Every structure is written in C-alpha cells, then in structure tokens.
Amino acid sequence: MNPIDLQVVLGALRSICDEMGAVLIRSSHSANIKERRDASTALFAPWGELVMQAEHIPVHLGAMPAAVAAILPRRQRPGDAWILNDPFAGGTHLPDITLISPAFRDGELIGFAANRAHHADVGGSTPGSMPAGSRTLGEEGVVIEPTKLVDRGELDADRLDRLTSQMRGPAQRRADLRAQLAANATGVRRIEQLAAASRGRLAEAFSETLDYAERRTRARIEELGDGVRTARDTLEDANGHQIVLALRARVSGDALALDFSGSAAQHPGNLNCPLAVTLSACYFALRVLTDPDVPACAGLWRPLEVIVPEGTILNARAPAAVAAGNVETSSRVADLVLAAFGCALGQGTMNNLTLGDDRFAYYETLAGGQGACADADGPSAVHVAMSNTLNTPIEALELEFPLRAVEYAVRRGSGGAGRWHGGNGIVRELEALAPLDYSLIAERRRSGPPGAAGGSPGLPGSDTLNGEPIPAKSSGSLLPGDRLRIETPGGGGFGEPD
C-alpha cells in the first residue's frame, strides 16, 4: 500500500473510533461517562489484533485485546454483541464493562468494534464498587463472564435486567449499556462502509497499519541504545506494608524485554493486576518512550516482550480482588518503566474516590502533577499515566449529587524542584449534604513521586476528614456537614536546580 493510501486509511480508522466515542459519551446518562469521559473505543481486525483506538483511557485500551481474545473463539454472527467484565476473562476490574460487536460484509467477518466504560456502580460491597478493603473478587461486584447480550440484532432484555438489577441505580446502568451498544453499532456500520470503499482491501489495510506501527516503534527502540536498565518502587498497602515491584528492562537492537520477576507475590487485598492490566501499562510506557505519534494499534507492541510470573501481584490468579490494581498498581508499573529510562515521575495515583448510598454512586479520579522532562516543567492539575479522564465539573457535581464543593484549587508548591519543576497537584474538598458512604483508594501518600537527573521528588498526597488525617485506603460514613479533603501529589522535578 502506498504511503498516501496508508495515511488515508489511518485517518479513516481514527475517525471511526472518535465517532464511536462521541456517540457513547453523548448518549450515556452517568456523570462518570458523560462528564468525565471514563470510556474508550477501539477497532479490531477479524483475527483479533487491535488496529486502532481513540486517544481515551490508556488502561482500558491496552487491556482490551484480552477481551476480544476471550470472545474470538465463539461463533460470530451479524448483529451480535458480547458483554464482559471478568478480570480473568478479558476484563480489568469489575466497573469496567466491555461490549464487543462483530462486523460482516457478504457473510464474512471483517472486524470488531469494541468499547469499555467505567460504570458508576456494579453491585460491590460499597457504593461505587471500589471498596478499599476488598479481599475477593465477589466483594467488588457482579462478575460478567463473556456473554452474548445481543443475538443477531435481538437484545436479550431479560439478561440486561438481571445484570443491572444487581447494581445500584439500575436504570442508569441500563441506559449506559445501551449507549455502549449504540457506539458499537456506529463502529460496525462504519467498518462495513470502509470495507465497501476499500474494494476488498480492508484486511490488507489492517495489516499495513500494524506493520507500519511496528516499523516506527522498532526504529525508536534502536535509538534507546542496547543495555539493561533496572528500577524498583513500592506500593503502600492498607496495613502500612511496602509492596515491592521490580523491573529489569533489556534493549537488544530494535526489541525491548521487560522482566518483572522480582516483584511481590499476589496480594491478599485488592492491589492485584490481571495480566492484561500489567501489559496495558507496559504498552503505554513503550509508546511514551518511543513514538507517541505512532498509530495506536497492536503493531507498536510487537517488539515488546513482557515477563511476569503467574501468582505475583502483576499476574494474579482468580479470584483475587483487583479493584485497586487496575487504577493504582497499573500506574506504578508505568512509573517503573519510565523510571528505568531516566524519566521524572508524575503523581503515580488516580486518587480514587467513591461516594453514595443504596440509590446512587459517584466516582471520581483526581488529577495531580506530572513529572518534568529534560526541557520543560511538568504540567499541573492533570490526569497522568494510565488515566486520561476529565474532572466532574462543579456544576454537574452539585446538581446531581448531595455534595457541595468547598474548595477546588491547584496545590501550589507541591511539584518537585529542579532545573525544570514538576507539576503541581490539586486540592479538592467536598462537603456531604446527606448521609453518605465513602471509599478512598490512593497512593503516593508516604513518599512523593521521584524526580530525575538531580531533581527533587514531588510532595506526597494527603487525605483528611473534618481536618483529621485518614488512611489513603479507607472507607467509612459521612454525616451532613462532614468534609472530605484530598490533596494530590505533585510531580518530580528534572535536573539540578540552577
């Protein structure tokens, strides 16, 4: 395929993913999807490789190939749609529900449209289904194994009702799932139109896209230089223990191997990652280190080998709890890879907060500081690494939930010093206007994100309830007037100060 045709194809594939995302976001009902855009869309080749994704949530998209792989051996028919969230059968953590729809032309399977959205609740032990103290997967909500939700165009309404009836806010859950179906229907229609326009060359276009991404990534890996780099870091569990993660990264020509063999064993709490989440973090870091503009597809990780022993915190066995692994441990995996190659680190946490009762649930991840780089300060008040969501605007927050925003501000001075300063975190203080339950899962509270090349670390985060410190992984109840305050970490600085 000549370069002009290839660029036209790449543009078409990106536009399909973007359109799917617009349909999903504009059709959904929950604030977490319509306001925060905690959702992702992607296209897959008929043999299961990711051929394009929108620039949405890194932890969703790098892990979504496992979801397609889970349904690929099943019989596919025009009009079908599959649903799943099982972390050990293609999912990440339970609130992330994936829908996958095959596309056909003249009776032949030509690809898949897929999307993943973080639902505000999936029936876990606490509102929001992100319990800080979960120890088994069953405590975190409804587990959906790969299941056909639409059969040849007919929605299984009974199955949909059975699933959502086990969740808080079932009407909103149904509405969001229907929005996901609408997004996939758009993707399928556009794939079929592209197949018709390509005159039978769609599979060739998919293959060319993957090969092109691989070539560009290999070229940039070669520029990193051969050799072995190492990195170690820790997670902070609820009992005060430090959980070690270790990486040995080897560059050999145009290939990269990431070996996490020295990392801790599977955790009794919920910091565990299914393998798909660990792979997703590695894919993200590889793209950052090599060529961020490479087409976002499976070709970019063909030069990558990831070694993760089974039964460790980064490749947990079922039925391990994984609620925090998807959001917190994934961030640390990305940090490890970036640190091994000399990068200053961002906040390294998503600062997960859920609030609600038996009727509703509110979920938010909070922004922080990004690490500085070799020629610029780190940006402040942004979602970093494995998260790429927005905030819930104050207007939407106070309109929909019994909450009042007391303070929302940049946390000045929290970024690490250096020739280039790390970005600042934020302060978010909320007041309950009704009795509510809360759950908090955060990291980087005992030590701040490291700097690089002589730069200082960013300030650690902190959390208080009515002015009194609370653990970074905690849950409890709020009475009207109670105030929960979260101060997020700053990013590390880069270089010795002038």
Image: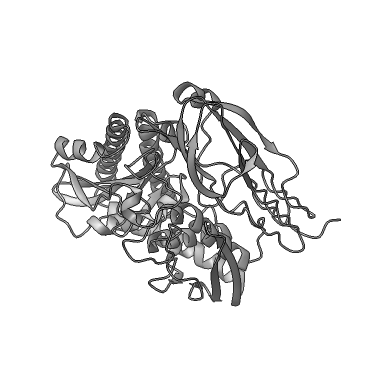
Q: How is the image coloured?
A: one colour
- Is 433 positioned to the left or the right of 107 in the image? right
Quadrant location of the C terminus?
bottom right
When the figure is inspected, residue 414 is found, relative to residue 211, above or below; the finding is above
Quarter of the image with the N terminus in it: bottom left
Going by the picture, which residue comes out furthest to the right? 498
Residue 226 appears in the figure? no
Q: How many marks?
A: 0
The x, y position of residue 234, in whole percent, is: 58, 64
Q: In the rendering, at what x and y percent does residue 192 appear?
A: 24, 42
Task: Tell me which residue sits at (23%, 52%) in the image.
Answer: 146
| 441 or 411, nearer to the observer | 441
The spot of residue 142 in percent (x, y) is: 28, 47
Q: Residue at x 38, y 72 (%)?
A: 310
Judging depth in this view, the residue of 99 and 267 nearest the camera is 267
Is residue 165 rendered to the left or right of residue 259? left
Which residue is at a point 61% across and 54% down the rendered structure image?
Answer: 444
Residue nearest the observer in this picture, 111 or 320: 320
Q: Quadrant of residue 169?
A: top left
The answer, for residue 351, to whether it is visible in the render is yes
Q: Is residue 131 above or below residue 408?
A: below
Task: Tell whether 339 sits left or right of 127.
Answer: right
Residue 494 percent location from the top left of the image: 74, 57
Relative placement, left or right, of 191 versus 9 is left
